[in-house]
Amino acid sequence: MQLAIQPGGRIVVNVTFDSTWENGVSILDQASQRLLKGFNNYFGGGGTWDSGVNDTQFVKLIDIEGCHKDGGPSGGLGWFSSPEKLLFDGKYNKVIGYSDGNGGGYNAAEANVAIHAAPDARFHSPDRARAPEGH
């Protein structure tokens, strides 16, 4: 799933797993497809990734992808792309669920995304704190 990090904003992704099969979640820079962070339920478990503040004037795009093996950890098993479903779609929070086909719906892996918007300059401008002229 593609997500946008607005100028001055940031996102925080918390990944959890609930599966006996091996699952992974990757966070990638959309333009270069460079891996920014990877999570695996057998090696390291879930965790949190913080994009940091987008200090550019451009929107940054990231991809969050799920994958799984048809069983536990084994070098003899291949990785498959996991079907995803948007489980919650709020303005500042999204939950993406991934299925590994081992029952249980879209909870084999979940990415809970908190979207932090840029601070609104209108509320921090010294000019807004002054009384209007003539008062």
Image: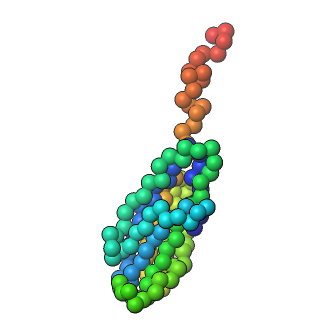
Q: Quadrant of residue 21?
A: bottom left
Q: Is residue 14 above or below residue 100?
A: above
Taking the spot 43% from the left edge, 67% from the top edge, the residue there is: 38
Q: Residue furthest top?
A: 134
Taking the spot 45% from the left edge, 71% from the top edge, the residue there is: 25
Residue 119, percent across and down? Answer: 54, 39
Residue 51, percent across and down? Answer: 48, 53
Image quadrant holding the N terminus, namely bottom right
Q: Camera-side residue: 89 or 116?
A: 116
Report the side of 15 relative to 92 (left or right).
left
Image quadrant holding the C terminus, namely top right
Residue 90 appears in the rendering: yes
Q: Is residue 57 above or below residue 38?
A: above
Color style of the picture: rainbow
Report the side of 63 relative to 134 (left or right).
left
Report the side of 49 relative to 94 (left or right).
left
Residue 88 appears in the rendering: no
Taking the spot 38% from the left edge, 73% from the top edge, the residue there is: 40
Residue 89, percent across and down? Answer: 56, 61
Taking the spot 56% from the left edge, 66% from the top edge, the residue there is: 33
Q: Quadrant of residue 62?
A: bottom right
| Numbered-mark total | 0
Q: Is residue 60 above or below residue 96?
A: above
Q: Residue furthest bottom?
A: 76
Q: Residue furthest right?
A: 134
